[in-house]
Image (spheres, grey):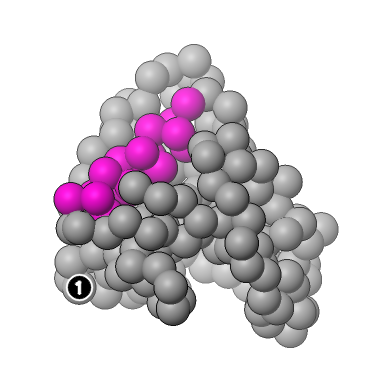
């Protein structure tokens, strides 16, 4: 898999669960090193994430994958919001670090927004850790920071920022 290969973006299927779980764990370890407790990141296992992604696909929430040479290198998921004042949410958008800055994130994000738009959603929220080095991506995509809240992950209290998007 080369860095300059153009990924294929498509809707996820059941056969993608292992690849999504692998990217989920690897991208967290790459992105959140120095942000989340090391013991928490070390304990992450793709097998434990597979059940989560199986439920997500069975529930019917849109999930999209970016793949290169039949290898998943990123994913995005979205659905109904968990926050008052919004009607849609992009729950997750993760890429392997090797794929940052190549356009896959933008394409995955646009696929998620289009899925939400097709569901009649108009006010979208995306939650991002304040210390996440890629959070500026959402500002670049037109998001406006409107909320913040503490969240506990792995025994650490972190700050999440909510970015709003109007469709």
Towards the viewer: 99 or 50:
99
Q: Residue shown at 26%/74% (left/top)?
A: 55
Numbered disc 1: secondary structure? helix
Q: Where residue 167 appears, x then y in whole percent?
A: 34, 47
Residue 24 in view = no
Q: Which residues are magenta?
A: 103-118
Q: Considering only vertical position in the picture, is 18 above or below 107?
A: below
Is 111 colored magenta in this rendering? Answer: yes
Quarter assignment of residue 147: bottom right
- Characterize the magenta stretch by its predominant secondary structure: helix
Q: Where residue 84 appears, x then y in whole percent?
A: 44, 78
Q: Considering only vertical position in the picture, is 118 above or below 148?
A: above
Q: Which residue is label 1 attached to?
A: 59
Is 7 colored magenta in this rendering? Answer: no
Towards the viewer: 21 or 149:
149
Horizontal placement of 113 versus 85: left or right?
A: left
Horizontal placement of 91 versus 51: left or right?
A: right
* Quadrant position of the N terminus in the picture: top left
Horizontal placement of 31 versus 55: left or right?
A: right
Q: Where residue 119 appears, x then y in whole percent?
A: 18, 58
Horizontal placement of 31 versus 2: left or right?
A: right
Quarter assignment of residue 107: top left
Q: Residue shown at 41%/50% (left/top)?
A: 166
Give the residue furthest to the right.
34
* Count of labels in the image: 1
Q: Residue shown at 41%/58% (left/top)?
A: 124
Q: Residue shown at 18%/50% (left/top)?
A: 118
Residue 159 in view = yes
Q: Residues within 10 Å of mark 1 (few under 14, many from 20)?
A: few
Q: Where residue 148 appears, x then y in whole percent?
A: 67, 70
């Amino acid at each position: 898999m080369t860095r300059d290969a153009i990924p294929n973006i498509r809707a996820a299927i059941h056969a993608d669960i292992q690849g999504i779980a692998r990217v989920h764990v690897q991208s967290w370890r790459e992105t959140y090193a120095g942000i989340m407790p090391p013991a928490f990141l070390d304990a992450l296992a793709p097998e434990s994430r597979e059940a989560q992604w199986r439920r997500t696909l069975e529930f019917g929430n849109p999930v999209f994958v970016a793949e290169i040479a039949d290898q998943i290198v990123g994913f995005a998921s979205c659905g109904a919001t968990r926050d008052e004042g919004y009607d849609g949410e992009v729950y997750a958008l993760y890429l392997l670090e090797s794929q940052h800055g190549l356009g896959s994130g933008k394409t995955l994000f646009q696929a998620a927004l289009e899925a939400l738009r097709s569901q009649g959603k108009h006010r979208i929220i995306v939650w991002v850790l304040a210390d996440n080095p890629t959070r500026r991506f959402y500002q670049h995509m037109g998001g406006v920071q409107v909320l913040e809240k503490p969240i506990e992950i792995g025994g650490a209290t972190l700050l999440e920022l909510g970015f709003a998007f109007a469709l």
